[in-house]
Image (cartoon, rainbow, N blue to C red):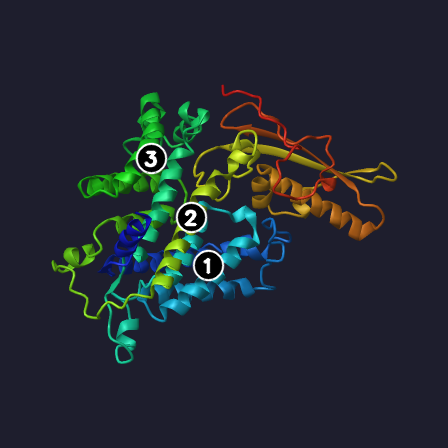
Amino acid sequence: MAERLWQHLESHLYRRVDGASLAVFRIAFGALMLWDVWKYFAYDWIGLMYVTPRFHFTYFGFGWVEPWPGNLMYVHFAVMGVLAFLIMIGLFYRVAMVLFLVAFTHAFLIDQVEYLNHFYLVILLSILMVFVPANRVYALDPLIWRRARPRQTHVYAWNLWIVRIQMEIMLIFAGIVKINPDWLQLQPLEMWLAQRTHVFLIGPYLTETWVVALGAYGVILLHVVGAPLLLYQRTRLAVFVLYALFHLANHLFFNIGIFPWLTLAGTTLFFADDWPRKLFSGRESPAAKVPARLPGPALRRSVIVLLGVWVASQILIPLRHHLYAGDTSWTEQGHRFAWQMKLRDKRSRAAFVVVDPSSGEIWNVDMRHFLTTRQIIRMSNRPDMILQFAHHLAARWQAERGGVAPAVYAEVWTSLNGRPYQLSIDPARNLAAVPRSLDPADWIMPLHTKLP
C-alpha cells in the first residue's frame, strides 16, 4: 500500500507540464525586484538604512553580517538591479538567481529594523527558484544555448507545485494569525481606516463599524477559505479577482511596497500551467519535444523527501510563537517569519540609563547619538532590539571607560492597538546582564491593559 502511494506521488510530481506560467512568474519577479532596487536609489533608502546608521540591529546568530564599508552598499544594490534584470529576461538565469539570493539575503540580514514580510517571502521564493527551471520559456537562455542542447519548454510538476504550496502557506497563515481577540474586536483596522477618510469616494464610509467589520472578517475568510479554493478550477478565477481587489486596496490604503504585486504574481501560478499561451496566442500547450528522461529512483525519492522537509519547515516555523507565553504582538517573540502581517499597531516611548556599578553614577542616554530616528522608533516597539541596544550601550561605555561593565536599565511605555500606555520592559532589570537568546523573556512585562 505504501509503495503504491509513493509511486502515485512520484508519477504526479514528475509529470511533465508547460513551463509558461513559471516563466511569467519569473518575469514578474525580476521586474518587481528591479523596480524595488530603483526605488532604493530614487529615495536614497540605501543611505538611510545602510550607510548613515552607526549601529545595526543584527539578527540573533548573524552578528557577523555587516554592510560594506563606505559607499559600497550602493554598488551592492546596483549589482542586485543587474541580476534582477537578468532574471527577468532569462539570461544566465541560474547564476543570476544564486547571486541575487546571496546579495538580497546579505542586505536583509544587516538590520532587523528593515524587516518586512515580503523581504522574507522574496528570500524563500529565491531559494526555490534556484532549483526551478523557470527559464525554459520566454527567456534568452534557450536561444543562446539552443545548439548546445535540445530546447525544452516543459518542467516537472513539482517545480510548479512547490511554489504554489509556498504561496498557499503564506496566504493561509496570513488569515489564521488574524483570528485573535484584538482583530476580532476590529482593532487595529478601525484605527487605520479612520486615518484614511480622505480616500476618494469611499473615504466617508471607512469610519462605519459595518465597513470595518466587513474588512476585518473578510480578510480572514479570503485567506483561510479563499486560498484553498485557488486549488479548484471552478472557484479559482473568482477568488483571484477577489485577491486582485484586495491587493489593490492594500496598495491604496497602506504603504507596503511591492508586496501586493509580488503576491498577485504568485497567485497566477494557480491557473493552468499553459495559461499564458492560451491568453496571449490562443494556443494549447505544445507537446514536449524532448523525450522525458526521469532521474533515477533514488534521486526522485530524495527530491520528494526534501520537498516534504521544506513544506514541513514552512508550516512549523510560523507556529513557534506558541512556545512563548503572552500575546505575540506584545512580546514580539516568534513574530517574525510567521506571516503576521498588518496585525498590530504599537507606539512606544523609551528611555535608557547607564549606571556605574562602582560609583553609582547615572547617565541618561540620548539615543540620537547612537541611532537614527527610524531606528529609535522601530527599536522602541521591539523588546529583543531594546535588549541588543542595551548591550551596545554597555559595550561602548566599557570600551571608553574600562573597568567593570555598567548596568543598563530601560523604561519603555507601550500602547498596543489603542490601549493605554503601560510598561513593557521591567525597569528594574539590568538588561546588560541579560544574554541574548531565543528563550522566553522574563524581563518583558505581561500585557494587562484592555482595549478601550
Q: Residue 340 carries which label?
A: none
What residue is at 34 percent from the left and 52 percent from the top? 163
Which residue in the protein does label 2 denote? 118
Instruction: Please name which of the two marks, 3 or 1, marks the residue nearer to the observer.
Output: 3
SS of the residue at dot 1?
Answer: helix
Q: Is residue 91 above or below residue 232?
A: below
Instruction: Examine the image and state in which quarter residue 219 appears.
Output: top left
Which residue in the rendered view is the most extreme toward the left?
282
- Disc 2, SS: helix
The local crowd at label 1, few if under 14, some if 14 to 19, many if 20 or more residues have their Cα within 10 Å, is some
Nearer-N-terminus badge (3/1): 1
At x 30% / y 34%, what residue is drawn? 225
Label 1 near label 3: C-beta < 8 Å?
Answer: no
Considering every residue shown, the one lying at the far right of the view is 359
* Label 3 packing within 10 angstroms: few (<14), some (14-19), many (20+): some
Mark 2 to mark 1: distance in Å? 19 Å
Q: From mark 2 to mark 3, how far is it between C-alphas?
A: 19 Å
Nearest the eye: 399 or 335: 335
Place of residue 388 in the rendered image (x, y in percent of width and height, measured from the top left): 65, 44
Q: Which amino acid does label 2 sit on?
A: His
Q: Mark 3 points at which residue?
A: 224
Three-letter code for the amino acid on which mark 3 is drawn: Val
Q: Do the residues labelled 2 and 1 touch (CB within 8 Å)?
A: no
Nearest the eye: 173 or 139: 173
**Residue depicted at 34% across the width and 25% down the height:** 213
Residue at mark 1: 41
Within the image, what quadrant is residue 221 found in?
top left
